Amino acid sequence: MLALTRKKGEALVINNNIEVTVLEIRGDQIKIGISAPKDVPIYRKEVYLQIQKENEAAISADAMDLLKGFL
């Protein structure tokens, strides 16, 4: 993991096309802005993990349906 120090208004660039900017610092919360191409999905980590979990469950259900078809 790369750890960087940024101040309000400063940014970093990822892969030449994604920019992350520190918009506001208030206590222990930091507001960030992300500029990226529309085809780049951006999720909060907890949402991303839930999507992954649901995708795995859907794949498992599809596999069970296929197995039932063979029996």
Image: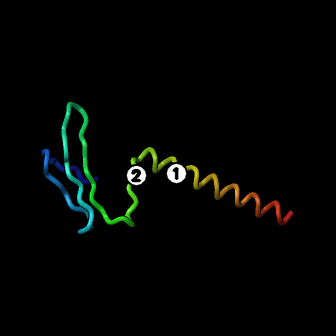
Q: Position of residue 59 (x, y in %)?
A: 64, 58
How many residues crowd mark 1 within 10 Å: few (<14), some (14–19), many (20+)?
Answer: few
Instruction: Name the mark on residue 27.
Output: none
Q: Which one is in front, 71 or 41?
A: 41
For this orientation, the residue located farthest to the top is: 27
Q: In which quarter of the image is residue 64?
A: bottom right
Of the image marks 2 and 1, the number of the one nearer the N terminus: 2
Mark 1: which secondary structure?
Answer: helix
Which residue position is annotated with label 1?
Answer: 51
Q: Which residue lies furthest to the front in this view?
A: 38
Image coordinates for residue 46, horizontal then vertical, percent: 44, 44
State left or right for residue 29 relative to residue 61: left
What residue sits 27% from the left and 59% below the top?
35
As drawn, 47 above or below 59: above
Report the residue that reaches farthest toward the right. Answer: 71
Classify 10 Å Cα crowding around label 2: few (below 14), some (14-19), many (20 and above): few
Q: Which mark is residue 43?
A: 2
Q: Which amino acid does label 1 sit on?
A: Ile
